[in-house]
Image: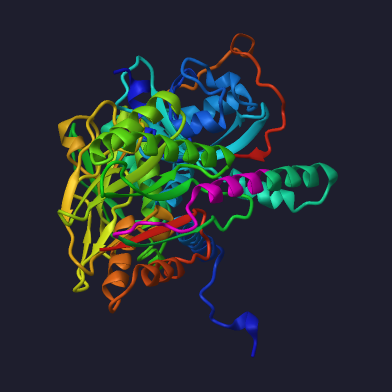
Amino acid sequence: MLAGELFGSITRAVSEPMLLVGLSGEILGHNAAMRRLFPAVVTGANLYGLTSDSPERVGDTLWRWARSGEPMAGALALIGAEGRPRRCHGFGSRAAWADVGEPVVQVRLVSTFDRERLRRMAVSNDRERHLRAQLEREHEIALGLQRSLLPDHVDAADLDVAAQYAPTAYGVEVGGDWYDVFPVPGTDRIALVIGDVAGHGLSEATIMSQLRSVLRAAALDDGCRPDRVAARLDAYVDTYLPASMATMCYAVYDPDARELSYANAGHVPPMLRRADGACERLEEVVDPPLGCSLGGPHRTGRVGVGSGDLLVCYTDGVVEQRRESLDVGLARLSALLTGFADPTPKDVCTTVMAWSTPTDHADDRAVLVAGF
Amino acid sequence: MRVANAAVPLTSDVFLRRFVTELTASLEEVIGREEATGYIGLAGQRLGDALGDLYTRELDLAVLDREQLAEVLVDLYRRIRGEVYVISADDDRIVLGNRSCPFGGQVRGNEAMCMLTSSVFGTMTARHLGYAKVDLSETIAARHPRCRIVIHLRPGAAADGAPGNEYYDRVDPPHPDPATRGAAPGADADRPC
């Protein structure tokens, strides 16, 4: 595999734009987020022609990054999706692993655009008021689309299920979180789904709607096989949504066997709160995010469930805090769930959402709880 | 009370040292250690280039060998009130000790400052010897009694197995011909991403 392809595969799930570039300026690889924000940045193009910086400045930046093995700060003014340059800061370092005949650097740009865009919109002039109205319209459409796809109430005869969703705290953004609950066609089993499409915007909301439909279609054939459903969605994203990245956990409850089977495509691990208060992370199987498996198989994990047990599915916005590792967030959630006395799914759902109420949340949040 | 006569321990040197440590601590607090070290690393690289130029110009040497480089690193810290000494030097590594941090007592608990030492030493070493990996396994900032600075001089198994940051030889920046590479459309580069 070429260095650029390897780089693109490894960084595909990274939500910030990433780039692999030779010292001569040749673009060797990029991730999906880079392609979304900067469509002109394609493999084989030259970075010098994709910025409004002077060649001397680009050369100096690449030269500095090429001399450091650790990520070092720098800035580039890249041509954005609208055809205009945007100044980005980021961190670059020597990609010593890439043997292509010249020094190569790997770069991670820091996406501050949306927050900066909000700040700039506060300045009142006609053009910005127009832009703001356009963005708000887009936001309303996206939010409406997203809301229409998330069930208002979940209907599962053998399960007591509750779900809640909260959009991102940034006003004009929507998220790609989704959940779903439905009977597996032709069986008495119940499917529970939670997922998260990377990014915040109308396109992510529409991708979420596609994935929800594709998943339900896959469930018509293989609804009882979480590994196959996950593989089907993985292939769909890889084939038809190459610039997108999503995570998902698909679980199936079998009321006869009192068993939960599940596949996890890069999603934060669901928690199983036992009736005695003990809390387990369902992480026996965790496979790459959708579109990132590179042909590898998806797997099914199984766990027995008893009366009074609760399955708690959630998205990363619930547990992620700035400057805190994910493990710390997961441990805090586990402690919260353990501390309940005889909770109902609705109690848990409401409490978890309130517990995760952010002061600086950039991400939306969804929680789905099922009681057995 | 005469303010001007008060024994406040403040000089311009103290002021600047304190400013640097507070700037580093602020960066670390606001954007986190990982990204703060990215900025300090850049400052260290620029500083390493500038200080390296001072020495090569004064010594009238384009390239320093290992012994000369070790001597320069010791001298550099001596001039800024550090107390660096050579523990050992061979083809594979230079090992330095340091009894006194140039940034003073405030450096304790402020380990991002060590990136500055790593970057300055690594940049200067790589420039003259081709490669450096700087391992700061013991530092005064991390509340050790002294700093122990191991500079690996050769990429390979020994350096790969050691912790630390890598620095590469001076790569001359390319001089692209804008006519052949094509000019970027627009000049409004102030829109952030």
Left or right: residue A300 versus residue A173 is left
Q: Is residue A149 magenta?
A: yes
* Residue A351 in picture, x, y percent from top left: 41, 71
Q: Nearer the viewer, residue A15 or B183?
A: A15
* Residue A117 in picture, x, y percent from top left: 66, 46
The residue depicted at 35 percent of the width and 42 percent of the height is: B121
Question: Outermost residue, top direction?
Answer: B180
The residue depicted at 24 percent of the width and 47 percent of the height is: A262
* Residue B6 in picture, x, y percent from top left: 58, 83
* Residue A289 in picture, x, y percent from top left: 33, 38
Query: In this rendering, is residue B81 above or below A80?
Result: below
* Total number of numbered discs in the rendering: 0
Q: Would residue A10 be visible to someone looking at this image?
A: no
Query: In this rendering, is residue A138 above or below A84?
Result: below
Q: Nearer the viewer, residue B91 or A148?
A: A148
Q: Is residue A88 magenta?
A: no
Q: Quadrant of residue B130?
A: top left
Query: In this rendering, is residue B120 above or below B177?
Result: below
Q: Which range is magenta?
A: A138-158
Q: Nearer the viewer, residue A252 or B80?
A: A252
